[in-house]
Amino acid sequence: QVLLVESGGGLVQPGGSLRVSCVVSGFTFTTYRMSWYRQAPGKSRELVAAIASVGGNTNYADSVKGRFTISRDDAKNTVYLQMNSLKPEDTAVYYCNAYRMPNYDYWGQGTQVTVSS
């Protein structure tokens, strides 16, 4: 059974930091590109950050570059998103995604991140 379980969301003040995690099981983690997406109320889901299965190459949405860092621990089947200098516009449900060609595409249930004073 494929499972992606996010955790670490919550309420944080503007300028604060938060780290969300995604633990996976049921597939070979090391062969999948891992990504974080987010969806704010009334908006479509958007890619926040991604990390390759091999080599560790990363890419980020322009809106989070320099503030967010994606990483993975293959020994723990876990991907992280470290979020610093958080802004109210970062408020969203954050989803973990695992993808491998040709069409293996798995999603977690999401974790709420709220940035507010």
Image (cartoon, helix red, strand yellow):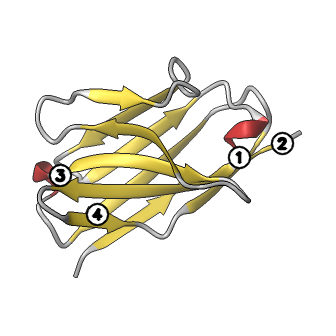
Tell me whether circle 1 and circle 4 mark residues in contact (CB < 8 Å).
no
Q: Quadrant of the N terminus?
A: bottom left
Residue drawn where x is 39% and y is 34% of the image: 70
Tell me whether circle 1 and circle 2 mark residues in contact (CB < 8 Å).
yes
Give the number of the disc on residue 91.
Answer: 1
Q: Tell me the SS state at disc 1.
A: loop
What type is the residue that disc 2 sits on? Answer: Ser
Local packing at callout 4 (Cα closer than 10 Å; few below 14, some 14-19, many 20+) is: many
Mark 3–mark 1 Cα distance, whole angstroms, equals: 27 Å
Tell me whether circle 4 and circle 2 mark residues in contact (CB < 8 Å).
no
**Residue extending farthest bottom:** 1
In this figure, which residue is indicated by the disc labeled 2? 116
Q: Tell me the SS state at disc 4.
A: strand
Q: Is residue 36 above or below residue 17?
A: below
Mark 4–mark 2 Cα distance, whole angstroms, equals: 30 Å
Name the residue nearer the viewer: 29 or 102. 102
Q: Is residue 50 above or below residue 22?
A: above
Q: Nearer the viewer, mark 1 or mark 4?
A: 1
In this figure, which residue is indicated by the disc labeled 3? 32
In this figure, which residue is indicated by the disc labeled 4? 24
Local packing at callout 2 (Cα closer than 10 Å; few below 14, some 14-19, many 20+) is: some
> Which of marks 1 and 3 precedes in the sequence?
3
> Which of marks 2 and 1 precedes in the sequence?
1
Task: Indicate left or right for 68 with 11 as reference.
Answer: left
What type is the residue that disc 1 sits on? Answer: Thr
Q: Tell me the SS state at disc 2.
A: loop
